Amino acid sequence: MSIKRLWTAGCVALLVGVGLLAGPAAFAASSVSTVSFTSQSLVGGATADWTIGFKASNGSGALTSGSTITVTFPGAFSEPGAPAVTLGSTFGAGCTASSSAADGPPSGSDVITVTLGSGCSLAKGASGSVKLAGLTNAPVGTYQASTFKVSTSSDTTPDSPSSAITLTSGAASKLAFVQGPSSGYVGTPLTPAITVQVQDQVGNPVAASGVTITLAPSVGEISGASANTDATGKATFNAVVINPAALGITLTASSSGLTSTAPSTSFNVTVAVSSGATLSSNPTDVGGSGVKSVAYYYCAGYSGTCTSANWTLIGSTTAANYQVTWTGQPANGAYRVVAVSTDNVSNVSQPSGSTPVTVVN
């Protein structure tokens, strides 16, 4: 080696020694595979404890009391304000640490800073691990390695895991309405079609095909209430019919081995009446002398009391089945209809229970 080369090498070594030139960065000499992210669960949206393993800098000082370890998660994750921290045994017996989530609500990235307490030490080049408790995973999907980073106060060069992290759905656990029921008419399938999805415990859709799901109404009778799930775990009910007319009905969905849904939002099933529709009734004998005639009345709105104080006569009849053709209907909208019968000795019944009717001229 020439004298000039020896002189140059000596000067560089001296400058590094006195701090005028920087030594190698913490992870500069390490592969990204030296940082690993693991959790108890890789279910999207589930809460889990995440363990971050890394290798301390080969080019700077050891981590000691007061040193910090910064962990960056993608912004879709959420975490407690100060997650509980557990340090690996290589930090020393009795070593504890505290943490803080520096940037508040989820944003482009979420930073958690871990500060080492007294008695902590991690030698240069040694491997360590930090477990953060209670982080809530982001939604189902694949998150690139570059969005997960680790750095320490002795070296601010961040490093990432060697491969992307995938969050998936968990095991089938419960059912949920995707398209709930809408109000409809007696004898007519409800539209749009009702759909129910198989989900895991935190609400991710589960692709469970061939699962039989059954619907049950809070009142009345139902047909078209059974369907099997498709390849995505969704069951479609396109022929649900409910009888008789009722207000405030809810549906529940159930399947063997899965938690039933909470009741659906409420909906109404009414009688659709167009111009000239025939109303009929089969009232009971109110006085033991036989029904002679039946009169029909309507009031505005689906609910409430319909009496002589607020009703309007539709018509009356003595014909078989007591049929009346409703002519001169009111404007389209919501109404309720009651029937009042008179027997052969002029006894008059109380108004029947009201039937919700939708007028469609």
Image (cartoon, grey):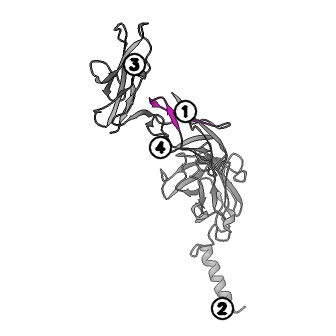
Residue at image coords 34%, 33%: 334
Q: Is residue 13 above or below residue 65?
A: below
Identify which amino acid the numbered label 4 is placed on.
Thr
Question: Which quarter of the rendered picture does the C terminus lie within?
Answer: top left
Kind of residue at disc 3: Ser
Left or right of 242: which side holds 61? Answer: right
Q: Along the line of sight, which residue is nearer the eye, 272 or 5? A: 272
56 vs 216, nearest the viewer: 216
Q: How many marks?
A: 4
Amino acid found under the numbered disc labelled 1: Ile
**Nearest-to-viewer mark from 1 and 3:** 3
Query: What residue do we see at 58% from left, 52% from top?
Result: 115
306 to 346, vertically: above or below: below
Q: Crowding near pointer 2: few (<14 within 10 Å), some, many (20+)?
A: few
Closest to the camera, between mark 4 and mark 3, is: 3
Query: Residue 208, position in %: x, y?
Result: 66, 48
**Residue matched to label 1:** 222
Number of the front mark, 2 or 4: 4
Label 3 – label 2 distance at C-alpha: 114 Å
Horizontal side, residue 360 vs residue 88: left or right: left
Q: Distance between the residues labelled 2 and 1?
A: 96 Å
